[in-house]
Amino acid sequence: MRNKEDITNWFKDLQDNICQSLETLDGLASFKEDHWERPNAGGGGRSRVITNGSLIEKGGVNFSAVHGDLPEKIQNALGFGPSTFYATGVSIVLHPVNPWVPIIHMNVRYFETESLKDHQSTYWFGGGIDLTPHYVNATSGHYIHQRLKEACDKTDPSYYSRFKKWADNYFYIKHREETRGVGGIFYDHLNEEKESHSFEDLWEFHQNVGKAFIPIYAHYANTNRDKPYSKEHLDWQRLRRGRYVEFNLVWDRGTKFGLDTNGRTESILMSMPPQADWVYDHQPAAGTPEAESLKWLKKDINWLADA
Amino acid sequence: MRNKEDITNWFKDLQDNICQSLETLDGLASFKEDHWERPNAGGGGRSRVITNGSLIEKGGVNFSAVHGDLPEKIQNALGFGPSTFYATGVSIVLHPVNPWVPIIHMNVRYFETESLKDHQSTYWFGGGIDLTPHYVNATSGHYIHQRLKEACDKTDPSYYSRFKKWADNYFYIKHREETRGVGGIFYDHLNEEKESHSFEDLWEFHQNVGKAFIPIYAHYANTNRDKPYSKEHLDWQRLRRGRYVEFNLVWDRGTKFGLDTNGRTESILMSMPPQADWVYDHQPAAGTPEAESLKWLKKDINWLADA
């Protein structure tokens, strides 16, 4: 049965567990926490930020649970009448020190609305995990896609391919004609009315996504964190971070929505890298790992294919 | 009489003159030019970029003249039926080396549309100049506002206060509750139907704005370019450049419109700084020039008041 308190508490625990694992993995830096409340509105959050670690240069792991009247903009977008809402979830973006370690992002959220007129209520789950390596090659996406497929298959054998395609389309930098990275999965508006699954099944699926985060990140972090890098690799990392900024500020619906509706700016923009560069019309030299990377920033790559 | 060829040629000359003046002012770097054409559409442009100068770290001075069918999105926004359009103008953003020199922006553009149904045509001028000092104090906006007021007053004594207010509202980073800098002037949709001025008067006003650019920038550049600066000043400059990125990618209508309608990405994003930083919840210490600067990022400051 649906119970938003249980869901909320599970997200809080997820934040705790992930922060603890990331501190262990980093070994040097620890999270700084800010509690915040929505001024003149309901709910708030716990923003946690880690900086200048041995693994993570700048990262955020945010929990929030907010409620109130559904803004008119969203009522219209959803085709709803006047309603109240409850939204809770965890959002993560980690920018690593070493350019060989990828940027990672996860968001898992639960949304509930109730009509003010007839008290009819509905809910849905939305979220995903995606990976943005600064350097990309044929095998960069193998591990994350394998783990995400396993997480999806436990609930529905069609979910991985459906949500993988959704991620390819969502994490797309249209003005660059590039995907943000190797993708992952993305889904939204999952509920028992739209899916052939019960609330319990969907909630279990959502939890499995949340639990997949640390094993995926630990794999990429541990495989790459000790690889030596030069000034040239750092230059490329900052250019790719510039693309990450472009995606988040121009195309990301969550960021736009947050900034548009007076969300807590510092929590929303924890996704920004510590530093980003722009070079006019930058073209990596043919045959370099940088040029190779750009070739893999395409939709519809089968990352599960044998390398 | 309206003549779009003359207007276009004047803008080309403006680009030439401004580039020449900026190279003289810089003394080290020179502009690199890219000619481009709109694929499957009409017109194109000359993008000119200058980097790693003694004064300018990264800057662009772009001219374009494009034409074709008015995209449906814009038809609707303007309340027009199917139409063709012609648009030409010059856009500039300069990011200086020295943090004591401000970032400057100018855009001057001319727009013409013609209805496909009855061949009725209309036109308007739009543009402005605004200044974004990394360090702001009570007198930072004095010179630019004085020069812009002089340029406005030649055509209409009401223009400066009207267009200054428009700039305060336009160059506003809503999610930070900060103006982008000390403002300047901004105007749009100026034509003889809406203003009590002839086409010739409005075109002269627009030219006066274009001609004001170099004297304004030269003043700020020459006053500040030799001021010594430290690592801390450069840190602050990169944080403020981050705010510039936020404004341009989240709120600037021109950037959004360009990226939405498959404009030439590298020309649109020439406004990006060479490097930008983000620090979670950065608060400058009380009493520092950085903290002082934030106090002046407000609307409705009378920069012409005696210092």
Image (spheres, coloured by chain):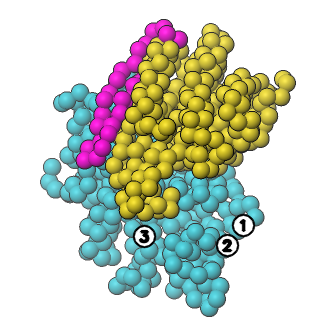
Chain colours: A cyan, B yellow
Residue at the spot 72% in from the left edge and 66% down from the top edge: A41
Residue at the spot 68% in from the left edge and 40% down from the top edge: B163
Give the image quarter of residue B120: bottom left
Neighbour class for label 3 at 10 Å: few (<14), some, many (≥20)?
Answer: some
User: Can residue A41 be seen?
Assistant: yes
Q: Is residue A110 left or right of residue A156?
A: right
Residue at the spot 71% in from the left edge and 31% down from the top edge: B153
Front residue of B195/B162: it is B195
Asked if A97 appears above or below A140 in the picture, the reply is above
Asked if A134 appears above or below A283 in the picture, the reply is below
Q: Are marks 3 and 2 in contact (CB under 8 Å)?
A: no
Looking at marks 3 and 2 on the same chain, the residue that comes earlier in the sequence is marked by 2
Q: Which residues are magenta?
A: B24-50
Disc 2 marks which residue? A68
User: Can residue B180 be seen?
Assistant: no
- Which chain is home to disc 1? A
Q: Three-letter amino acid code at disc 3?
A: Asp
Label disc, if present, on residue A188 of the rendered structure: 3
Disc 1 marks which residue? A41
Q: Secondary structure at mark 1?
A: loop
Front residue of A107/A53: it is A107
Name of the residue lying farthest toward the right: B306
Tell me where residue A267 appears, x and y as whole percent: 60, 52
Q: Secondary structure at mark 2?
A: strand
Give the image quarter of residue B190: top right
- Report how far apart the C-alphas of labels 3 and 2 lie in the structure: 21 Å
Neighbour class for label 1 at 10 Å: few (<14), some, many (≥20)?
Answer: few
